[in-house]
Amino acid sequence: MLHRLWLIFAQTATICVAALFVVSTLRPEWLPARLEAPKLPVAAPVQPAPAPSAASPRPASFHDAVGRATPSVVNIFTSKEAPRNPLLNDPIFRRFFGEQFGDGAQRTSSLGSGVIVSPAGYILTNHHVVEAADEIEVALPDGKKLLAKVVGNDPDTDLAVLRVNADKLPAISFGLSDELRVGDMVLAIGNPFGVGQTVTSGIVSALGRSGLHINTFENFIQTDAAINPGNSGGALVDARGNLVGINTAIYSRSGGSMGIGFAIPVSTAKMVLEQIIRTGAVTRGWIGVEVQEITPALAESFRMPDARGAIIAGVLRGGPADKAGVKPGDVLTAINGAAVSDPSSMLNLVAALQPGSNARMQLRRQAQSLDVSVTVGRRPKPQPRE
């Protein structure tokens, strides 16, 4: 019975399919309308971005700041005589390698950067860029090259002032480094590795960095803007293109940028620049003492309430401090009312004093507070490097 029912169902289904095929082929209009598959949208042609108008907002860019500052940043090439290799005096060596070595002394060259700070041709750079150079050549951004001479230098801050015989040069505008804040955007401009003028960006990572043993007077701006060899003496500018520092040094284990660079604040650079142009040298105050940092252990042994100040470790006999009665072991806490927090701040405060003036110094001696008046002397010139 089931077998017969299955045969009837199969035959009926076959006849229906055959009938549907015949009707769909010969009379498709008899069939109900079929649902059509949705059509995919045709891709619209790509429209080019409209040209920006003067009124339309632009993406964030430092193009204008770079355009203001880069014409004032120059490349500095120096050369100097190097000690002659003794092998060059050996006739066998010279005969084997040729006579191209000549009889004169060998010369070495180096590369750095500088910043035009006056239309009259004054240029700021690092002292170590031009130190002991016999010849200094300045390359302007337009490709023009000029010989430069050293007007004066200040090894204590690693700054030097050059001058070229030209006028109407594009001088950079000075910013206010004292108003910089950690997190402010800055741009470093120079000629790293001699590849040509380059701009890198970063932020102010820290202010007032000292104790790095780079210079005698340290008050560095720290930045993560990439600074590499050849950037020394170049410009650190703010987001408006104003000079806020002179790029000086990097912390690196490889010789390249690791995101820790240091720049001399423009406030220090301006002071050095003005004194060198006016007198040819930088004059600083001096009291003839050697100071030592107060560690927590020393603060405890001296029964001090905190570790602020600077311990007088030595006093030069016959110097200004000695004449005023300052003794080793005294703790210097303030100069003319300005607090001394550590030896670096003490050094900067004393250096800012005018030689010949009287300075009031607050001391702590065996738990007693003392006020002494010191006649400020002139800081001796640093000894040249060997």
Image: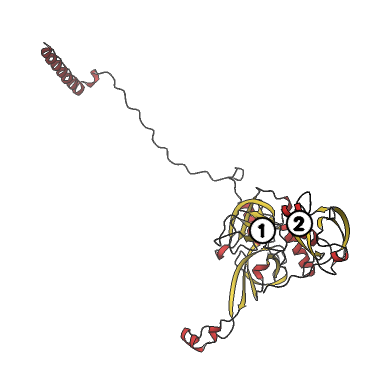
Residue 271: image quadrant is: bottom right
Identify the disc placed on residue 263. Answer: 1
Residue 325 locus on image (x, y percent): 87, 63
Element class at badge 2: helix
Identify the disc placed on residue 345. Answer: 2
Classify 3 as above or below 207.
above
Toward the front, the furthest residue is 301
Amino acid type of the residue tagged 1 in the rendering: Ala
Residue 27 in the figure: left or right of residue 338: left
Quarter containing the N terminus:
top left
Closer to us: 115 or 299: 299
Q: Circles 2 and 1: CB distance less than 8 Å?
A: no
Quarter containing the C terminus:
bottom right
Marks 2 and 1, how far apart at CA: 18 Å
Q: How crowded is mark 1: few (under 14 residues within 10 Å), some or many (20 or more)?
A: many
Closer to us: 284 or 20: 284
Residue 310 locus on image (x, y percent): 77, 57
Amino acid type of the residue tagged 2 in the rendering: Ser
Toward the top, the furthest residue is 1
